[in-house]
Amino acid sequence: MNSAISMIREKNKNLKPCIHGGAVWEAASMAGFRREEILDFSSSVNPLGPSPNALEAMRGSFGQIASYPDSNSTQLRKVIANHFKGISGDNVIVGNGSTELIYLFAETFMERGDLALVPAPTFSEYERAVRKAEGRLKFVKLDSRFHVNPNAFARALKGSRVAFFCNPNNPTSVLTPAERLTAIVERALEENAFVFLDEDFLEFVDEGERFSLISKIRLYANLFVLRSFTKIFGLTGLRVGYGIASEEIISLMLDAKLPWNVNCLAQSAAVAALADEEHLKKTRELIRGEKAFLTHGLKRIKAFKVFPADANFILMDVRQSGYTAAQVAEKLLRKGILIRDCSSFRGLDEYYVRVAVKTRRENERLLEAFEEIVGENYGE
Ligand SMILES: Cc1ncc(COP(=O)(O)O)c(C=O)c1O
């Protein structure tokens, strides 16, 4: 037989996994720590973890493990629809993490050679999903404060099949106002293009639902809104996310997806997580206070340029410290702290880092560690 490499499909030849935060296993083994000893600021998830009710519901579903899960996550889709009002379960699709739905969307709606518009910098899986679907990419650079120029974006929409947009954006933590997004969706409609709007971090934004376009899916047949149970709900390792769109889009995606894509434990936990409003309230209060605390502490480190954060993570430019992001990350890892070196993001250079907002004790540890490191070089 010929070597496998000589038989790989052309489109997969240069495909590599994206780099992400949260790689605690690798970090621990690299730095000689146990996994539990790593303080992870690199993945921006609920620092309180999941709702205890979600864990209880999951344990209550252990008896279902011997059967296949509901392939279409019917109950969870209904519960999600009730949560948002004005939509039905037929407007909802559930995925193995929201990542699955990014790939499924591209695979369902993009022909080879179709053009996808992607801002830079943003979450890297959109680009990879387009490449896997054999689409072409056009990148729209965000401005120096990482805001989108709506006119430039609208112009770039010409000839596109789909525009990806993340609100608030990862890694910049910038929220785009709903009116600006609506204008983009309307322009895309004229161009016969979809808008794939990733709202995975919107629940961390104060009064976030005011900024959501979920209520607009009946108005715009080209709109797909992405959400996740990974971030504020903290069901990160269970892998469950969802998308909301017209019945037509959802039904086409349901037909194209893999069977049994979301396991039974994840489905039960997600139903219970959505109902636990107390846990969400507690989380939002914590994030609000701790974001202010951490931002204030970081801003006192003169060598860092701290960008305003709308979500539960903060982007910083560390070039004045005399270190690259990789060097800062490496020094922190030696102290058992993992942060996101953002140099892999298209549109950022090697001087940006991203940190999540965590609990007071954890945030204090991060600030102390930063001060020690920067002090070494900057004389603070
Ligand atoms: C903006 C954004 N969208 C989607 C995802 C995928 O999340 P998940 O597949 O865990 O739902 C991530 C993960 O980091 C993300 O940052």
Image (spheres, rainbow, N blue to C red):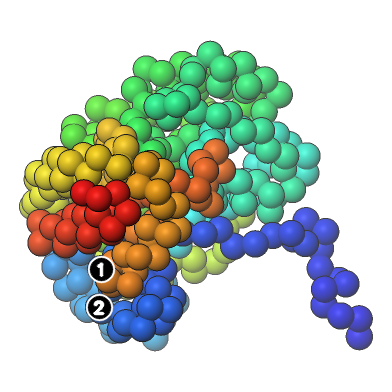
Q: Amino acid at mark 1?
A: Leu
Residue 37 marker? 2
Provide the secondary structure element on which disc 1 rests.
strand
Classify 10 Å Cα crowding around label 1: few (below 14), some (14-19), many (20 and above): many
Q: For residue 67, what is the image quadrant?
A: bottom left
The residue pinned by badge 1 equals 39
In the displayed structure image, the side of residue 323 where residue 221 appears, left or right: right
How packed mark 2 is, by other alpha carbons closer than 10 Å (few <14, some 14-19, many 20 or more), is: few
Residue 66 vertical placement versus 85 (above, below): below
**What separation in Å lies between label 1 and label 2 (alpha carbons)?**
6 Å
The x and y percentages for residue 314 are: 29, 44
In the rendered view of the protein, which quadrant contains the N terminus?
Answer: bottom right
Is 244 on the left-hand or right-hand side of 204? right
Disc number placed over residue 141 in the picture, else none: none
Q: Disc 1 beta carbon < 8 A from ligand 1? A: no
| Relative to 3, residue 294 above or below | above
Q: At x 40% / y 65%, what residue is drawn? A: 330
Q: Residue at x 16, y 73 (%)?
A: 56
Residue sticking out furthest to the front:
379
Number of dots carrying numbers: 2
Image location of residue 90, percent across then percent down: 42, 44
In front of the other: 147 or 89: 147
Specify the farthest residue to the right. Answer: 1
Say whether residue 26 is visible.
Answer: yes
Residue at 91% in and 81% down: 2
Nearer the observer, 65 or 315:
315
**Residue 246, x across and y down, in percent:** 48, 35
Residue 359 placement: quadrant? bottom left
